[in-house]
Amino acid sequence: MDLHCPGKYGGIHDYMSLIEGGEPMATAQQRYSDMLEKNVGSAAGEIAYSRAHNVRFMTEWNRPAPNSLSFFVNKGAELGFTFEIPYCGENAEPYSKDGLRQFGAIMAKTLDEFHRGGER
């Protein structure tokens, strides 16, 4: 995973979002994203995640280029992606340290479930 912050404010920059790629990674990304959305929703934490906020491949600035995803594909990774984590949070409510830790734990749990074959 390539985890980092997008630009400052507005649009995608206000939401947790996975930057989707094309095949051969797209199917795995979509599976992980669906699992993450379900796990975040069932945890009822302060930070939401919806696949609807992902940046689809070949939309906006998300075009083929040398980047972390191409590195993951070239190394033969089963799953790889960039995940944007906003600086502040949604709805003018800053994320708390505890909320971010909880979200990170859910991401890790989901990654473990993904590799164990969940939600196929």
Image (cartoon, grey):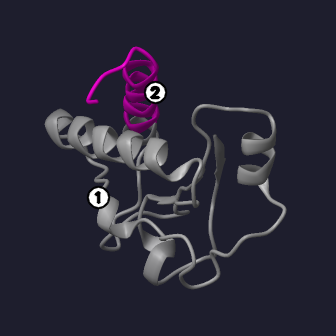
Nearer to the camera, 7 or 54: 54
Q: Is residue 41 left or right of residue 54?
A: left
Magenta-highlighted stretch: main secondary structure? helix
Please report whichever mark, 2 or 1, sits nearer to the chain's N-terminal start.
1
Asked whether 112 falls inside the magenta stretch, the response is: yes
Q: Position of residue 92 (x, y in %)?
A: 35, 73
Instruction: Please rate how many residues cluster around mark 1, counting C-alpha atoms within 10 Å: few if below 14, some from 14 to 19, many from 20.
Output: some
Q: Residue sitting at 31 percent across and 50 percent down?
A: 47
Q: Secondary structure at mark 2?
A: helix
Three-letter code, disc 2: Leu
Three-letter code, disc 1: Ser
User: In the rendered structure, which segment of residues is drawn in magenta?
Assistant: 101-120
Q: Position of residue 111 (x, y in %)?
A: 46, 27
Q: Which residue is mark 2?
A: 111
Q: Residue sitting at 40 percent across and 35 percent down?
A: 98
- Distance (Cα) linking label 2 and label 1: 16 Å
Q: Residue sitting at 28 percent across and 53 percent down?
A: 48
The quarter of the picture where residue 5 lies is: bottom right
Q: Which residue is mark 1?
A: 50
Q: Is residue 9 above or below residue 57?
A: below
Asked whether 18 falls inside the magenta stretch, the response is: no
